[in-house]
Amino acid sequence: MGNSISGLEGVVAAETKLSDVDGAAGRLIIAGSEVESLAGAVSFEEVFARLVYANERDGARVRSELGEARVRAWHLLPGLREVLELRDGMDALRASIARTTDDNAESIAGAVATFAAAWSRVRQGKEPVVPDASMGHAEDYLRMLRGDTPSDPLWRALDAYLVTVVDHGMNASTFVARVIASTGSDLVSSVTGAIGALKGPLHGGAPGPVLDMLDAVAKPERAEAFLRGELAAGRRIMGMGHRVYRVRDPRAAVLEREVQKLEKAGVGTETLALARATERVAERILSERHPTRPLRANVEFYTAVLLDAVGVPRAAFAPTFAVSRVAGWCAHVAEQKATGRLIRPGSRYIGPRPETVEIVRGLR
Ligand code: COA
């Protein structure tokens, strides 16, 4: 078990109206609603309006502002060619967002979508696709990624994903964004720092490896041997376990439901059955090893299945997480700035101390 001081478990670092994570009950409230009732029912733009503008702007206005912002970001691409050729999508996103100057939520959110999609296209040796300002954010992002107009079920599933992961209490990247904001720095700096935090495999970098794992398992009957091998080699099972949830992550269930809807709409997702079987085995093996610490599926497990099913390339999974979470970061930055307080925790010194103390009195 990790050291609770170094992990800050249970430390409350802010008051927020944005989201609430109940780890014992497995409940997530986003902007006053249960995640189960938002995803698949309310658009990403609507949730953006609730979080970032506390409903002072409506979803329709946010939709057109995000559209215009995607197009503005498109015009920055010629100056970002070198950055978009970086191998890792989060490196490309971090560097490209760092170079933007429009310090408002919709400009940055639009830029994240345009840059993430453009990076993914360049990585595949394809030309980036021009944004269409008249489209919804999810549909246009998926179109820019895939290079064709996605069917309704596909972009709706992506929209549900964007809503599901938009905010999640004091997660690591949100904390980073708030710490940076608390110094009086700008929104671009907060989001750039948050992207760096989201990149890590213990946070947003897990869904790509989840899909790698499902590929390696290949057949449900191979899951047990594969997972035992991973644990024996000292590796963690990606998509399992959570710092806060002691039950199954409610977002895993929401995304599983959305993938099921895709199946009903005729979008074949063989991975769903494999994922379910692998999850069951992983849960059993982990409970044998950690009988007192529940390690159940987290959001990344079914993120991998959903994003794969809608045609997001695996390498673009983490950047796609940022396309959503940037809304949460921007909302938290505004909330933090409103407090006017610098976040500056203490530390307990455990290094050597000098035997004699010499106090420099200052020159008179
Ligand atoms: N696979 C195998 N063992 C795991 C595990 C996993 N996915 N998650 C936790 N454990 C083990 C740890 O090794 C530790 O074992 P120990 O007590 O023998 O040292 C124990 O469970 C407790 O883990 P701890 O490191 O205290 O948990 P945490 O709260 O710091 O970790 C995560 C939370 C998410 C970082 C962790 O569960 C993890 O690494 N999961 C895989 C990555 C992932 O899916 N990330 C996305 C998160 S949304």
Image (tube, helix red, strand yellow):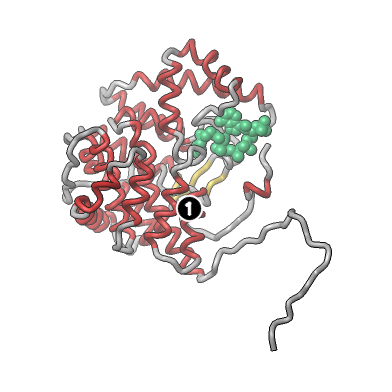
257 shown above or below 190: above
The answer to which quarter of the image holds residue 258 is top left
Where is ligand 1, by quadrant? top right
Which three-letter amino acid code belongs to the residue tagged 1?
Answer: Thr
**Residue shown at 42%/15% (left/top)?**
218
Q: Is residue 160 in sight in this rendering?
A: yes
The front one of 81 and 244 is: 81
Q: Is residue 252 left or right of residue 119?
A: right
Where residue 119 appears, as percent x and y from the top left, is 27, 42
Residue under the point 42% across and 24% down? 212
Relative height, residue 220 to residue 262 (above, below): above
The residue lying at 28 percent from left, 30 percent from top is 311
Note whether residue 248 is visible.
no
Name the image quarter holding the C terminus.
Answer: bottom right
- The residue at the point 22 percent across, 50 percent down is 77
Residue 92 is drawn in which quadrant?
A: top left
Image location (x, y in percent) of residue 165: 41, 43
Residue under label 1:
174
Rendering coords of residue 303 (x, y %): 40, 33
Furthest toward the front, the residue is: 363
Residue 161 point in image, percent of width and height: 36, 39
Tag 1's secondary structure? helix
Residue reaching furthest right? 355
Q: Residues within 10 Å of mark 1 (few under 14, many from 20)?
A: many
